Amino acid sequence: MLAYQQSGFSVDAGVCIESHDRAGLERLLRYCARPPFAMERLRKEGSVTSAAPRQMS
């Protein structure tokens, strides 16, 4: 079992980074460190901050 889904989140353990792959490690760390919402999608209306709906292409 390399993937697990629970309400609200999912985990994929199928990603493997070789010890010498510094660029791959950096990509993975940047992905893990990114915020859950893009700052440009956030807007403030009155006293409530919400995320704009995602545009489906």
Image: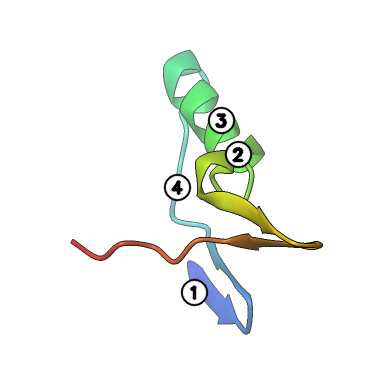
**Cα distance in 3D space between marks 2 and 4:** 17 Å
Instruction: Give the foreground label among 3 and 2.
Output: 2
Q: Which residue lies furthest to the left in this view?
A: 57
Instruction: Give the foreground label among 2 and 4.
Output: 2
Considering the numbered disc 1 on the image, is that residue within a helix, a strand or a loop?
loop
Residue position marked by numbered label 1 in the rendering: 1
The local crowd at label 2, few if under 14, some if 14 to 19, many if 20 or more residues have their Cα within 10 Å, is few
Among the two numbered marks 3 and 4 on one chain, the one whose residue lies closer to the N terminus? 4
Report if the CB atoms under discs 3 and 2 are less than 8 Å apart.
yes
Question: Closer to the camera, 55 or 27?
Answer: 55
- Across and down, in percent, residue 57 comes to 18, 61
The local crowd at label 3, few if under 14, some if 14 to 19, many if 20 or more residues have their Cα within 10 Å, is few
**Cα distance in 3D space between marks 3 and 4:** 14 Å
Is 24 situated above or below 35?
A: above
Considering the numbered disc 4 on the image, is that residue within a helix, a strand or a loop?
loop
Q: Which amino acid does label 4 sit on?
A: Val
Instruction: Give the foreground label among 3 and 4.
Output: 3
Among the two numbered marks 1 and 2 on one chain, the one whose residue lies closer to the N terminus? 1
Mark number, residue 30: 3
Write the residue at 53% across / 22% down: 26
